[in-house]
Image (cartoon, rainbow, N blue to C red):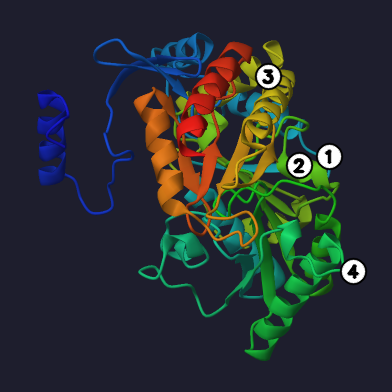
Amino acid sequence: MSELPEHIQETIHRRERVLGPGYTLIYKEPVEFVSGHGAHLIDRDGNDYLDAYNNVPCVGHAHPHVAEAVARQMTAVNTNTRYVQEALVDYAERLLATFPEELSKLSIACSGSEANDLAMRVARFHTGGEGIIVTRWAYHGITREVASFSPTLGAGSPLGPNVRLIDAPDPRLVAPGSTLDEHMRQQVRGAIDDLERHGYRLAALITDCAYSSDGIFTDPPGYMQAVVEEVHAAGGVYIADEVQSGFARLGDSMWGFSRHGVLPDIVTMGKPMGNGLPISGVVFRPEVCEEFGRNVRYFNTFGGSSIPVAAGAAVLDVIERENVQQRVLESGNALRAGLREITKDSPYIAEVRGAGLFVGVEIVKDRETLEPDRALAEDVINDMRDRRILINGTGTSANTLKIRPPLAFDSADVTRFLETFAEVAKNRL
């Protein structure tokens, strides 16, 4: 702390005096930014940091097209969904066109937590059940309801008695002679049986399609079909949480669930939707939400208002005009290939995994035992920060490097990242 510039030390002291509980800073040496562009953040002294962590500025920090659209709307009007807004309808039509035709109803909120809260309310209403299945270290939000099925929040935020946990789809957990499909089916079947034993009918299985908090497990595609079959057989619905994996993040599709060839009953999204403006969404199969809509009042003052919708529409413009999905696919393939080459002989790297621009590098004490090494992961994260590249950690032991840059991350950024990571790996891995 004493080594930080004086103005940062003073800001941190002031922050501690006035901010409420739960606020934390990342990195041993916190950093302050005053501007950004693409996948780059600039500190007060003009130093350029490569952002390989922040997914909220989906199409890039301070993207001029998004900024111009928001500024233009701010000088015009900002009304809510109780007034006719052609722009809102245009946006809903464009967004829904990226989904299978069966997913044809959109509700807009402000945050991923709100989206998942609404999704679960609808799921309960539609099914008449209360039981919820999530993965062991899932994160789905911070409202009281959603926190009750977000185990990554820890012991201080207890799970609901109606919540059951299953493995993330880690192929290494599959018993010899079995398959990931069958392993996941058995996990879900066991959770359903235990819920029913305790008097809970299944309402929903909700999964983050990249299993971001569990340690990033994106492959192999295909196992979700067996999972969804079990959920539907028990009368539940499948909610695909696309807050982190959506908007072409995984490269080979716009939405993470598409990689598995399944049709969710409900899809939620947030964070990247407005490139930093607070907007989130829930997409439904109409038969799942229609009765809820007829019987339950739902209105969100800011959800669907003019300014966030302008941001959302501008994000879709950029994804289309800049061929973002192809860039993500190419940059992600190059990034993972480079990381695998750098770490292939390291006894401390269990796996490099992921899809598109969502990459995990699992750090262990030994490749044979796979014992997590959180301390070494933190050293790598902070070494990268010291070299002005931002990443963070994830997984149950926070020993998996989480590499999840804005989708503006291009070939030059990949080269810079890999060259820097190779320096750190030479010393640490």
- Res 177 label: 4
Is 321 displayed left or right of 379 in the figure? right
Residues at marks 1 and 2 touching, judged by CB atoms closer than 8 Å? yes
392 versus 207 height, above or below: above
The disc, 3 or 2, on the residue closer to the chain's N-terminal end is 2
Q: How far apart are marks 1 and 4 (CA)?
A: 38 Å
State which mark lies toward you, 3 or 1: 3
Is 177 displayed left or right of 263 in the figure? right
Where residue 177 appears, as percent x and y from the top left, is 90, 69
Q: How far apart are marks 4 and 2 (CA)?
A: 40 Å
The disc, 1 or 4, on the residue closer to the chain's N-terminal end is 1
Q: Which amino acid does label 4 sit on?
A: Gly
Is 139 displayed left or right of 341 in the figure? left
Q: Distance between the residues labelled 1 and 2?
A: 6 Å
- Disc 2 residue crowd, few under 14, some 14–19, many 20+, Cα 10 Å: some
Q: Quadrant of residue 116?
A: bottom right
Where residue 371 appears, as percent x and y from the top left, is 55, 61
- Res 101 label: 1
47 versus 212 height, above or below: above
- Disc 4 residue crowd, few under 14, some 14–19, many 20+, Cα 10 Å: few
In the picture of the structure, the residue carrying the numbered disc 2 is: 104
In the picture of the structure, the residue carrying the numbered disc 3 is: 324
Q: How far apart are marks 3 and 1 (CA)?
A: 23 Å
